[in-house]
Amino acid sequence: MELDEKDIRRFQNTLRDHSEYDFTEYSLTCLRRRLTRILLEYEKSMEEIMDAMRSDGRFLDEVVKKITVHTTELFRDPEVWKKLRQEVLPAYRDRPAIRIWHPGCSTGQEVYSMMMLLSEMGMLEQSRIFASDINPDVLEIAGEGTYKYHFNQSYLENFQKVLFGETDTHHSSLRQHWKKYFHIDETRDMIRMRDFLRDKPVYKKLDLVKDPNFFLVKFDLIVCRNVIIYFNDELQNRVFRLFWDNMEEGGTLVLGVHESILGPCSKCFLKKDSFYQKKPA
């Protein structure tokens, strides 16, 4: 089932005209991929999907949620987390408060990964954690901090790589260390984060396309990985400007391993490996 640009533009216009959402500046490639899956799942044509969106607000919300759900995992890309531990976070150790924002946090595994890392570094207490997403369903999952064990099981290896390096830590002692942060119930296929982690973040629904910074603070660190890849170049630069405007001097922006800052905003940041440091105005 091949969707052409005209089909996608019609979908974007229908969504914009019948909801609060505006996907007109999303990447056409990414939208085509997501919409193709939606058509197959519902076994409907593009015209039938749009007719249902016009007449049924709940269906429209379902479509939006399917488009905006992004894959995430505990300590995704361990090398990035190692560099955060070694090169970025130590610079903030002596600050009385460290403000960290995870825009596009999805179901929250990245937020919990950050808090576990901060705890290991003795920096969690002074940190304030903020997280946002356009999709309220994933924010609810993030707040609950409960995940499928077997889905995340292989990613627990990332936990070991980031917190203990490549040393061969005994499995039983590693599991004992996990208990500081989450409870594993294999019979119920469940990982549940400890309350001291679940209670710390402030979550808000926020649409990077059109919303301001609802948290009303400036951030030392913004971690926005594998989100801006879904936006076209113009929207990416608007989002980068939003980040720049809401970062403390010398603050750091972390993007996904396949993302980078191009265009006008590339002059606003100093690239350091996977990280971008805010330049003064």
Image (cartoon, rainbow, N blue to C red):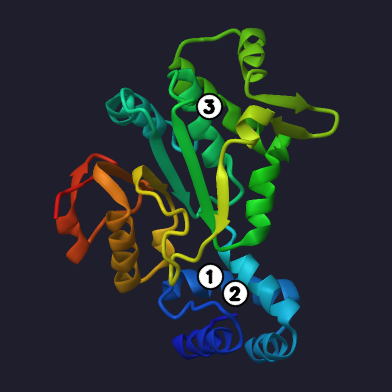
Residue 277 falls left or right of residue 123: left
**For discs 1 and 3, the disc positioned in front in the rendered view:** 3
CB within 8 Å, label 1 to label 3? no
Task: Evaluate if marks 3 and 2 touch, with contact meaning CB atoms under 8 Å apart.
Answer: no
| Residue type marked 1 | Arg
Along the line of sight, the residue nearer the viewer: 216 or 91:
216
> Which residue appears at 28% of the width and 66% of the height?
237
The residue at the point 59 percent across, 59 percent down is 69
The quarter holding residue 234 reads bottom left
Kindly report the distance in space between the C-alpha atoms of the residues bearing marks 1 and 3. Answer: 34 Å
- Find the distance from the CA under tag 3 to the CA under tag 2: 37 Å
Earlier in the chain: of badge 1 and badge 3, it is 1
Q: Is residue 273 left or right of residue 227?
A: left
**Image quadrant of residue 174?**
top right
Q: Residues within 10 Å of mark 2 (few under 14, many from 20)?
A: some
- Residue 175 in the image, given as x and y percentages of width and height: 66, 15
Q: Amino acid at mark 3?
A: Met
Query: Which residue matches tag 3?
Result: 116
- For the residue pair 218 and 54, the one nearer the viewer reads as 218
As drawn, is 24 to the left or to the right of 45? Answer: left
For mark 1, what is the residue?
A: 33
**Residue lying at 56% horizontally and 79% vertically, measured from the top left:** 20
Asked if disc 2 and disc 1 are in contact, CB closer than 8 Å, the reply is: yes
Give x and y (percent) for residue 60.
68, 79
Q: Secondary structure at mark 1?
A: helix
The residue at which mark 2 appears reads as 36
Residue 231 shown left or right of residue 263 in the figure: right
Can the viewer see residue 72? no
Where, quadrant-wise, is the C terminus in this rendering?
bottom left
Amino acid at pointer 2: Thr
Q: Which residue is drawn at the image coordinates 58% and 32% (left, top)?
A: 155
**For marks 3 and 2 on the same chain, the one whose residue lies earlier in the sequence:** 2
